[in-house]
Image (cartoon, grey):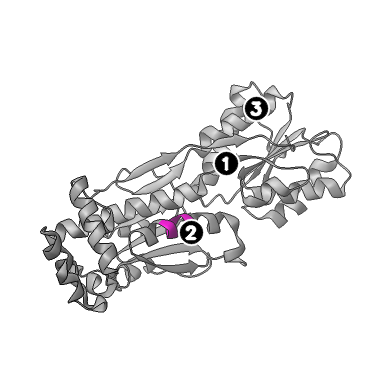
Amino acid sequence: MNMIKNIAKDKITLKDIADIAGVTSMTVSRVVSGKGSVKETTRQRILKIVREMDYKPNLLARSLSSMRSMTIGVIIPKTEQVFLDNYLAQILTGIMAVVKEYDYKLMIYPVEDSESKGNLYLTVARSKLVDGIILLKPKIHDKNLKSLAESGFPYILVNHRSEEQFYNYIDTDMHGSTVMVTEYLFEKGCRRIGFVAGNREEQNSLDQLAGYHSGLKKMGLNFEEDLVIYAEGHAGKAYSDMDNWLSPHQMPDAIICATDYIAIAVMDRLKSENISVPDDIAVVGFNDIDLAKFTQPKLTTVKQPLLGLGKTAAENLIGLIEGEKTSPVQTSLDLQLIVRESA
């Protein structure tokens, strides 16, 4: 190990470690990155040298040698308080955990609904600033998705399912879980089950609405248009559009809400009208944001694995970038009903 003393710490390279360990630079790279198979005794020997030499990967050199930016782009829907949105925050946290583990960096692109995207995705792809893109909740009518998929540039869609077989996406079963919630409320004795819909420009919201129809049919209940509020994902609109439900002959005995934020607004409106949750009306949300367990009453909700969505998306995207995976990547994660006090 005398060679260790003769190399300045800021000049140490993978090749130096490889020479000392008597292995190839590729073997050292596999050990340092945690990817690829290496014999355990060899791995431990390399890690010991890495620790003794206090080796830190040179990300700039790595990006130059691989002709990559070592950066992941994340395109998110821009909201009024985007970084206070717990849904986005949890998914981004999952993405960041994986990005850090694989020595990549993160670049975030908030995009407004009203903003003319042009060919934004291809513009980002061709900028050379990122090696791949993660898109959160893209709109179903977004024609730019197809051109991105056809370009061959690495990408993953999150919370967006498509019948097209060539898209890469990570999603959850919103249809099946909404059927599950409807069945749960029916078994609790509810027969007039209302639904507050999300943004119908997003596939998840359409899946929820279809699941609500399927759940009613499964339970032998008739669909009533008056029991649906099309809030388009806005909690404030859900709050104000409940007027028709507040008369005794129109009032549902349970309400399924497309998101937890909508459910919290619905419960607040019911409280302002002196209507008890769950004694008069049961309320169920979706996503299980951190706030759900602190509402009064505590919110019953369907838990989306938001951290898991972020982590799975990032892991699969890096796999596409580094050639360890091939398109199409299509994964669906499980959902879980979290029963609390509101239903």
Label 2, residues with CA under 10 Å away: few <14, some 14-19, many ≥20: many
For marks 2 and 1 on the same chain, the one whose residue lies earlier in the sequence: 2
Q: Give the residue drawn at x 45%, y 53%.
A: 310
Pointers 3 and 2 in contact (CB under 8 A)? no
Q: Write down the quadrant of residue 179 in the picture.
A: top right
Does 14 sit above or below residue 329?
below
Label 3, residues with CA under 10 Å away: few <14, some 14-19, many ≥20: some
Q: Residue 235 at what x, y percent from top left?
A: 69, 54
* Residues shaded magenta: 92-97
The residue at which mark 2 appears reads as 92
The residue at which mark 3 appears reads as 184
The residue at which mark 1 appears reads as 303
**Cα–Cα gap, marks 2 and 1:** 17 Å
Q: Secondary structure at mark 2?
A: helix
Pointers 3 and 1 in contact (CB under 8 A)? no
Does 302 sit above or below residue 51?
above
Residue type marked 2: Leu
For marks 3 and 2 on the same chain, the one whose residue lies earlier in the sequence: 2
For marks 3 and 1 on the same chain, the one whose residue lies earlier in the sequence: 3
The image quadrant where one finds the C terminus is top right
In this view, the residue in front, 45 or 196, is: 45
Residue type marked 1: Lys
Q: Secondary structure at mark 3?
A: helix
Q: Residue 156 at what x, y percent from top left?
A: 36, 54
Q: Residue 265 at what x, y percent from top left?
A: 74, 51
Residue type marked 3: Tyr
Does 163 sit above or below residue 46?
above
Q: Confirm whether residue 231 shows in the render.
A: no
In this view, the residue in front, 315 or 268, is: 315
Does 252 sit above or below residue 150?
above
In this view, the residue in front, 173 or 86, is: 86
